[in-house]
Image: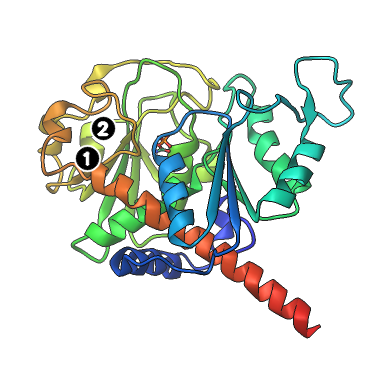
Amino acid sequence: MKNYTDLSDIKDLQQLITEALELKKAKTALEIGKGKTLGMLFFNPSLRTRLSTEKAGRLLGMEVMVMNAGSDSWKLEFEDGAVMNSDKAEHIKEAAAVLSQYCDIIAVRAFPDLQDKEKDEAEIVLNSFKKYASVPVVNLESATGHPLQALTDAITISELKKKDRPKVVLSWAPHPRVLPQSVPNSFAEIMQRLEVDFVITNPQGYDLNPEITKDVLVIHNQEEALIDADFVYVKNWSSYQSYGQKLSEDRNWTFSAEKLLKTNNAKVMHCLPVRRNMVIADDVLDSDSSVVIKQAGNRTFAAQAVLKSILEETVKEVDLGKNA
Ligand code: CP
């Protein structure tokens, strides 16, 4: 793979899942990344993505550099032709070109503003790095997607499923703040590429982007959607139609042990961090039904499989260059 900015960069999903599970089983460090540097830039906070991707890079033999962009570095200007008389001291054109001399892979986290749908969907930060960097770019969660999380989720379901075609339900849950649609977008996208019966349940007004959900069944009654579910992925997101708004904080949608009774003894997933008793109740998170910790553990192997695939592509390109 050349870049990992969205799920379309995965050509063979099953093969990548198998690779990640083999890396997990092997528990050995590799040398493919020796002498290579992974540079990670965070425009927003992170616990799992930052540490699991750093660990993944090191397990491949890479050096890893991490920077909180904007606070540790100069504020970046992304607008072409801007008169730079604001607080933004450096243009992405120079920044990406300079970073490309220090790093063999650049990974970026940049959340949406949730004010302007068109602007968020343009993925200005991620796409500017892709445009102006001369090395591969990895998405650590962008305005509209979280492909490393989605790969982790697909790995976790593949690892835990007890039937060939499990029923997977993505359920909206309440949250005190407005959150991006990136995690549910990528989860919905990757579930359409797995052998699963996939259903989304959310209140009216919270339907995700129909260009992503396509023909996926959306049920606005949570209890009906949960019947016979083998996996329930609980997540809050802000409204896509009333872009970036919070239309409801209805705690009837909080996922509790009572809701679990509707399912086929489902495994309960969440990308974390999770707001206890708002998104998922203690009686689920503290039970054997919750797989959120195992899921977070798989972040390392998803990142390792992706970085390894990019490094292999780089080696291939160097070999082709030698033989040209
Ligand atoms: N799930 C996830 O991306 O966690 P962090 O925000 O802590 O990286």
Other-residue count near label 1 (Cα within 10 Å), few / some / many at <14 / 14–19 / ≥20: many
> Residue at 27% of width from left, 26% of height from top?
279
Q: Position of residue 250 (x, y in %)?
A: 29, 16
Q: Amino acid at mark 1?
A: Leu
Asked where in the image residue 114 lies, by quadrant, the reply is top right
Screen quadrant of the C terminus:
bottom right
Screen quadrant of the N terminus:
bottom right
Q: Position of residue 129 (x, y in %)?
A: 71, 43
> 243 and 90: which one is in front?
90
Report if residue 231 is visible in the image.
Answer: yes
Q: Is residue 219 above or below residue 298?
A: above
Q: Position of residue 152 (x, y in %)?
A: 38, 52
Q: Is residue 123 above or below residue 37?
A: above
- Disc 2, disc 1: CB below 8 Å? yes
Q: Classify mark 2: helix, strand or loop.
A: helix
Ligand 1 positioned in quadrant:
top left
> 181 and 57: which one is in front?
57
> Residue at 30% of width from left, 61% of height from top?
158
Q: Which residue matches tag 1?
A: 226
Q: Which residue matches tag 2?
A: 222
> Residue at 49% of width from left, 42% of height from top?
146
Q: Classify mark 1: helix, strand or loop.
A: helix
